Image (cartoon, helix red, strand yellow):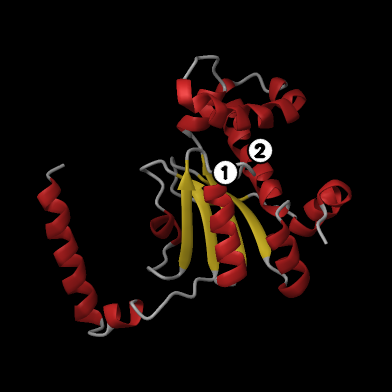
Amino acid sequence: MDIKTIFDNNKKWVDEKLGLDKDYFKNLSEGQSPDILYIGCSDSRVTAEDIMGIQPGEAFVHRNIANMVPNTDLNVMSVIEYAVKYLKVSHIVVCGHYYCGGVKAAMQSADLGILNPWLRNIRDVYRIHQNELDAITNEEEKYKRLVELNVQEQCVNVIKTSVVQTAFRQRGIAVHGWVFDIHSGGLIDLNIDFPKLLENIMEIYYLD
């Protein structure tokens, strides 16, 4: 791609927005009040605003390899803290996608250097659900199921945080697990039962 094309596209985008609303950027500069925190994959094919059909300012977005929420990652933990405590989002979405390179890499035994500790988090998901996954004989279906289970476990990691538990008790914040199907373009709601998940882990992870 010619980098100049990006600046040409930006000018067209600015002109288009101003053509619809002359105060668009003035209003955009006055602050943000998103209702959704979206935690997704860095994959170039999966852009949060496009797949949700939303505009700038409507979602606070964090992306990393395989939409992970490890408690040791200060980046994602800071994003959750800021979005929940200060932006007061009402929904947290963890969105994975089928044919995720990070999940696929975690299913293999190759030494990937600095990626190893990151992918180990996904391998831990496989370990937790090994009986179910090993019972799937079709490799593609196993791969897709691990994508779904990884989203589920990252939702659990979100729920483990004190700021989310507090927001749930005080104002009923919701946590959602989705998968983007690249083949169809559709979003799949995994119907994560947030209160039930919290109840299941409360004995160990409940924070007052």
Q: Residues within 10 Å of mark 2 (few under 14, many from 20)?
A: many
Identity of the residue drawn at 68% across and 23% down: 136
Task: Evaluate whether residue 170 shows in this view.
Answer: yes
Between disc 2 and disc 1, the foreground one is 1
Q: Residue at x 53, y 57 (%)?
A: 79
**Identity, as a three-letter code, of the amino acid under mark 1:** Asp
Q: Quadrant of the C terminus?
A: bottom right
Task: Give left or right: position of 172 versus 103.
Answer: right
26 w.r.t. 206: above or below = below
Q: CA distance from mark 2 to mark 1?
A: 20 Å
Q: Which is nearer the N-term, disc 2 or disc 1? A: 1
Q: Which residue is mark 1?
A: 73
- Please tell me whether mark 2 sits on a helix, a strand or a loop: helix
Q: Nearer the viewer, residue 78 or 16?
A: 78
Vertical order, 48 against 1 (above or below): below
Q: Is residue 188 visible?
A: no
Residue 203 placement, left or right of 49:
right
Q: In the rendered image, which quarter is residue 37 located in?
A: bottom right
Q: Amino acid at mark 2?
A: Leu
Q: Which residue is mark 2?
A: 149
Q: Position of residue 72 (x, y in %)?
A: 62, 41
Query: So how many labels did they put on this image?
Result: 2
Which quadrant of the structure image shows residue 196? Answer: bottom right
Mark 1, Cα crowd under 10 Å, few <14 / some 14-19 / many 20+, is few
User: In the depicted view, which residue is nearer to us: 185 or 81?
Assistant: 81
- Given the current orientation, which residue lies at the most extreme right position? 203
Residue 1 in percent (x, y) is at: 16, 42
Residue at 24% x, 74% y is 17
Measured from the top left, where is residue 34 in percent x and y?
50, 71
Of the pair 56 and 98, the residue shown nearer to us: 56
Q: Position of residue 199 (x, y in %)?
A: 85, 54
